[in-house]
Amino acid sequence: MSLEAHAIRVRLGGRPVLDGASLAVQPGEVVAVVGANGAGKSTLLRALAGLCRAEQGRVEIDGAGTDTRDRRSLAREIAYLPQDRTVHWPVSVRTLVGLGRLPYRSASAAESAADRAAVEAAMTAMDITRFAERSVTELSGGERARVLLARALAQETRYLVADEPAAGLDPAHGLQLFQHLVALAQAGKGVAVALHDLSLAVRFCHRVALLKDGKVVACGAPGDVVTEQHLAAVYGIRATLGRVDGLPVVLPVSPLV
Amino acid sequence: MRYVPALVWVGLAAAIGFAASLLVGPQGIGLPLGSDAALLVLFEIRLPRAALGFLIGGALGLAGAVLQGYLRNPLAEPGLMGVSGGAALGAVTAIHSGLAAAVPFALPLGGLLGGAAATFAVMVLAGELAGPLTLILAGVAVSSLAAALTSLALNLAPNPFAASEMLYWLMGSLTDRSLVHVWLASPLIVAGSFVLFSTGRALDALTLGEEAAENVGVDLGALRTRVIAGTALAVGAATAVAGAIGFVGLVVPHLLRASARHEPGRLLVPSFLGGAALVLLADVALRLVSPAGDLRLGVVTALIGAPFFLWLVLRTRRELGP
């Protein structure tokens, strides 16, 4: 069982963004996708979630291609959390989380007991039940990030693809969010997540995929992928790797000139 | 106001507007029963006017709510898609060419053709993969061209009577519409409204943005087709029989949005009823103010709409100001 992208090629506006990138996510693991700005992380995640038309390559769930699946059935397999946390109307938190149940509801049907249970469970997991009736636009950045993740959880999918879910969050909320992602993986979900904080990646993720110029140049256990040589080659930085209180730390020191 | 009471109020307002539209006319207030002539007035003159007011107002309110939800912009209105501009050009062309005078119902048919042509042009111009922004640009481009050609037709009017007829038509009116107009417009408006109502769930999902909406199962291409087709049918038919009636599609969803708790899908039914109420009541009001029928409906809705816009500016300034 896995969600896999094979040799994906994508062009955006004539520019090749992905050039034969591959990535696999198994249930029970968190896979980090890291790389410099513009390396193709977001596009790879969108391709994995079936939201991006690939020129070449194939995305499979359990060995079966996803390009022939309709949107609703795919929506029950993969939840996708975009980097953009804009919410366009000031709807209530409960309403927003409920949108995660749309793939299960027919055109005119009201929410079923299963829908309500899934929404309650997602809100409890993200600890947002106490502001269920507040408007999403009144919340702080950290609260909003949790609400949006709860929407993805309410979808009850086997896979979660999240694009920089911790960007813009303070350290406490960033840590909390990654603890949630690890807990989801322990509960059996396969999670792919793009991020820039390499310390978070090596500490929380089971595997790391390193992206450069639209290709995955290294993929494996964090200790094998996040090395001084790789960071120099991919980011053009000198970095120090170490441990503080038994936790792995990556400290970017200076750009290589 | 909460949702259900708001729904009851706009429903009641629409019902009162409809009843008043049947009861008010140049022959005085009251149900003209008793004579054959009075029945004729009721069924041949006032009923078509009330039915068209209900359907056209509803179509404009509904289309406004759908477009605001689809474009995620509270300033969107039905005219943005080019269909009203195209319908106006079609009707004005029918007057200019003399067809309107020579052939029965050439005027609304010209409007329908113009609206359809404008919609087709917008779709071709925007292309298959158009997002909302491309669609707005295409709509604005087609609307501008239609407005320019409409001005040209006015400019080159064969005689002053034709020119004034065009101008009056552009101001929008429900005066002197017959049952044939109702039969012409209502199937299209009803069909278009059904298509527009069907977009509710997808509009809710768009609250999350396009990618997340796709991720919860929305087919964005199919949604765009339904938004364009529904607007073209409902608003095209409305403009073809009644001319340009502005501000309804902009103002009504705005007023009702908070009662629908800002959920785009929940806003659709109240917006239809609210649009119907506004057009019916405005049409009754102008009959009371000027029984001779020289005041135009589009002028009255604009007179209500523009001050509302000013109020909106002031409120936004207060909210954003220091």
Image (cartoon, coloured by chain):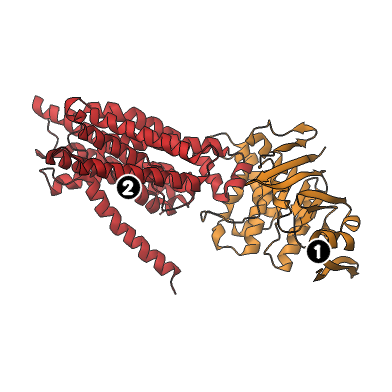
Chain colours: A orange, B red
Closer to the camera, A147 or B233? B233
Tell whether label 2 touches label 1 (CB within 8 Å): no
Residue holding disc 1: A236
Q: Quadrant of residue B275?
A: top left
User: Which residue shows up at 67% across the image and 34% down it?
Assistant: A73
Closer to the camera, B256 or A24? A24
Name the spot of residue A183 as percent of width and height, x first. Answer: 79, 53
Name the spot of residue B146 as percent of width and height, x first. Answer: 33, 42
**Residue B121, visible in the rendered structure:** yes
**Viewport quadrant of the N terminus of chain A:** top right
Name the spot of residue B61 as percent of width and height, x first. Answer: 36, 44
Q: CA distance from mark 1 to mark 2?
A: 58 Å
Closer to the camera, A65 or A154? A65
Q: Residues within 10 Å of mark 1 (few under 14, many from 20)?
A: some
User: Which residue shows up at 37% across the image and 31% down it?
Assistant: B190
The disc placed on residue B127 is: none
**Mark 1, secondary structure of its residue:** loop
Closer to the camera, A25 or A147? A25
What amino acid does circle 1 point to? Gly
What amino acid does circle 2 point to? Val
Residue furthest toward the bottom?
A: B322
Residue holding disc 2: B248
**Mark 2, secondary structure of its residue:** helix
Tell me the chain of label 1: A
User: Which residue shows up at 22% across the image and 31% down it?
Assistant: B48
Of badges 1 and 2, the one in the foreground is 1
Instruction: Give the total of numbered labels.
Output: 2
User: Which residue shows up at 77% across the image and 57% down it?
Assistant: A35
Q: Residues within 10 Å of mark 2 (few under 14, many from 20)?
A: many
